[in-house]
Image (spheres, rainbow, N blue to C red):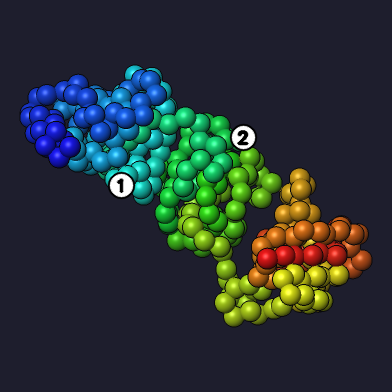
């Protein structure tokens, strides 16, 4: 394998050669079509044609060299690190000039992909359209500013492939942030439509908020069992807990109950009820502040 890959790298490195295919190691799992990487813009210079998975472009002496891309069918994921690590992007059309894109001269691995469904791979995919449609970019590690990926304030839906992620409206994980642990087909439900600027793995925690460093407040009214905790009427800072987030109406009671349980250190809510707010004002978990609410959580049972 080493000799064959090395020999191919030598051939691919010869000046003026183009249209070379990846070695057998890079072709396994091909699903039809091909992608051609070009050294210069407008499909000029040396090129490498790939019709299967290429986990490391060093094999082809083409690492961090692509400045334009042409497709011969299919959808192709390009990543900035070997073995499909780092930031990734699914290419669905020709890219004649990548000069203003963060992936210019940065691509280290390439593979053919089908539609990425929830749980199919690592990371999180941001889509420019609702319902997981349109231009998209996949992130597998912290990205403090999506501008360099050409995706700042562009996301309208998100697919979570694995783990828990924090998305924020400002760079460097500042501004309003939300923890997302499942796919969201329309980010307007969370008030994040075309507002996301930075993304990182892990939960969002702030000092002075239950569940975050400092514990500036606690969830009152709990009854603890061996592996469960029960909140007949949960309160934070003396206020009932709102059953919905601002602008959210679909499954909002379920989302709020699960979030309450996670803040309390448990995994999920196995039961909850929704009642009319008695005081007119309640504590919003997502916004970490009080506000007027019509419905609040009651009888929340959390389990590990």
* Circle on res. 157: none
Q: Which residue is mark 2?
A: 131
Q: Secondary structure at mark 2?
A: helix
Asked whether, in this view, residue 100 is left or right of residue 136, the answer is left
Asked whether, in this view, residue 23 is left or right of residue 169, the answer is left
Q: Which residue is mark 1?
A: 81
Relative to 33, residue 265 above or below: below
Relative to 160, residue 8 above or below: above
Relative to 297, residue 151 above or below: above
Residue at (89% x, 68% y) in the render = 279
Q: Nearer the viewer, residue 184 or 273?
A: 273
Q: Nearer the viewer, mark 2 or mark 1?
A: 1
Query: In what quadrant of the picture does the N terminus appear?
Result: top left
Expressed as whole percent of the image width and height from the top left, the position of residue 171 reads 46, 57
- Give the CA separation, mark 2 to mark 1: 28 Å
Expressed as whole percent of the image width and height from the top left, the position of residue 221 reads 82, 76
């Amino acid at each position: 394998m080493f000799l064959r890959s090395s020999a191919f790298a030598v051939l691919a490195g010869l000046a003026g050669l183009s249209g070379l295919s990846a070695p057998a190691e890079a072709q396994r799992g091909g699903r039809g079509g091909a992608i051609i990487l070009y050294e210069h813009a407008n499909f000029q210079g040396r090129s490498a044609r790939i019709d299967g998975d290429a986990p490391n472009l060093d094999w082809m002496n083409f690492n961090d060299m692509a400045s334009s891309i042409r497709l011969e069918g299919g959808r192709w994921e390009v990543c900035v690190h070997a073995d499909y690590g780092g930031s990734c992007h699914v290419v669905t059309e020709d890219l004649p000039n990548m000069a203003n894109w963060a992936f210019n001269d940065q691509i280290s691995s390439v593979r053919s992909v089908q539609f990425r469904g929830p749980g199919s791979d690592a990371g999180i995919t941001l889509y420019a359209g609702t319902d997981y449609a349109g231009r998209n970019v996949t992130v597998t590690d912290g990205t403090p500013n999506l501008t360099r990926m050409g995706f700042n304030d562009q996301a309208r839906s998100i697919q979570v492939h694995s783990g828990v992620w924090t998305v924020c409206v400002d760079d460097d994980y500042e501004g309003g942030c939300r923890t997302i642990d499942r796919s969201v087909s329309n980010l307007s439900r969370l008030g994040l439509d075309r507002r996301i600027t930075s993304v990182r793995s892990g939960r969002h925690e702030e000092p002075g908020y239950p569940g975050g460093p400092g514990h500036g407040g606690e969830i009152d009214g709990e009854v603890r069992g061996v592996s469960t905790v029960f909140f007949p009427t949960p309160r934070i800072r003396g206020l009932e807990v709102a059953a919905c987030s601002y602008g959210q109406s679909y499954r909002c009671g379920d989302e709020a109950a699960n979030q309450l349980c996670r803040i309390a250190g448990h995994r999920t809510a196995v039961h909850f009820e929704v009642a009319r707010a008695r005081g007119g004002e309640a504590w919003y978990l997502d916004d970490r502040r009080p506000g007027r609410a019509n419905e609040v959580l009651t009888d929340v049972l959390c389990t590990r």
